[in-house]
Image (cartoon, rainbow, N blue to C red):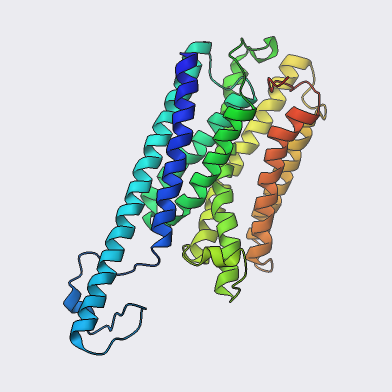
Amino acid sequence: MSVLSDQLVTFSILAYLVAMVVHAVEYALGNARVRVDQPARELVGAGVGAAGGAVSGPEPTVRAATAAQRTAARARLAGLGAVAVTVLAALLHLGALIARGVAADRMPWGNMYEFVLTVSFIGVASWFVVLWKRPTLRRLGLLLTLVMVLLVATAELLLYTPIVPLVPALNSYWFIIHVSTIVFSSGIFLLGVVPAGAFLMRSGYEQGRRSFPYLLAKRMPAAAALERLTFGLHAFSFPIFTFAVIAGAIWAEAAWGRAWGWDPKETWAFISWVVYAGYLHARATPSVKRNVATWLAILGFLTVMMNLFGVNIFFEGLHSYGGLD
């Protein structure tokens, strides 16, 4: 089962990469706003042209409208194909986690490698929920699959750890309670940083900026929709993250005789909590610009990544369960 898990992780990386490429194809086809089922003749009066403007003469206009329909159909097909491949990648990803858990005879959260795999899976699974409710945000899939390729490939290439039993301190029912909520909230934060970054680029583009990286957001959803999604994801995840921190303190009291000792992971968890609380407060304050608040959300995610990678690599403490040599 361990070998199967490793193979499924490799296949999932390849599938995420293919999904990213297909998303890029949809993105490159442009803003095809013509309905696929709309007859070309109905578009004549609207003056749909090859370059988006009016074309003189009925026949050129019909041909241009037909070409626009074909572009729209190709874009839609590419988008649906990208989603299908992303689903396949997520199923392979889930299969790898299940196989890893069966092989280890425990939940697959015992080290840094397993934690990254689980957090990234929660992020992509949450994306499907968002996509089901807001299909117009599908083009965010390009950024999401890019993030998935980077995270899962990093886990496989740099963080891989053979299966070993849990350290004694983790053999507790609090392992399920605390780590599951940390994993879930971190996965939602991971998803939340995608529309946050897209919003900053798109809002700059809507304000007339045409330099890098704002030009990359030319075909992204509207900035207002991206900002609302960013806020909704963080508002949903923050209470879960808060519960996870409290549960960790209760577990620490039971395991080590103190609820809080400013261990490096505890310190950075507190920093993350403060930053995310600051983001939600700034977002609810009318005088704070949306761009400023969104930067706080991105900063919050950077503190989560510091807690996950930096603390495990550069610091020693009671939470040193990364599994890295």
- Seen in the picture, residue 123 relative to 32 is either above or below; the reply is above
- Farthest residue toward the bottom? 56
Report x, y in % for residue 323.
68, 19
The answer to whether residue 58 is left or right of residue 8 is left
Q: Give residue 108's quadrant in the image.
A: top right
Residue 10 shows in this picture: yes
Q: Quadrant of the C terminus?
A: top right
- Seen in the picture, residue 121 relative to 95 is either above or below; the reply is below
Q: Quadrant of the N terminus?
A: top left
The answer to whether residue 228 is left or right of residue 154 is left
- Seen in the picture, residue 110 relative to 67 is either above or below; the reply is above
Report x, y in % for residue 128.
41, 43
Number of labels in the image equals 0
Report x, y in % for residue 171.
63, 11
- The residue shown at (29%, 86%) is 55
Residue 181 shows in this picture: no
- Seen in the picture, residue 277 relative to 111 is either above or below; the reply is below
- The residue shown at (75%, 20%) is 253
- The residue shown at (70%, 50%) is 299
- The residue shown at (49%, 45%) is 145
Along the line of sight, the residue nearer the viewer: 172 or 223: 223
Report x, y in % for residue 219.
46, 65
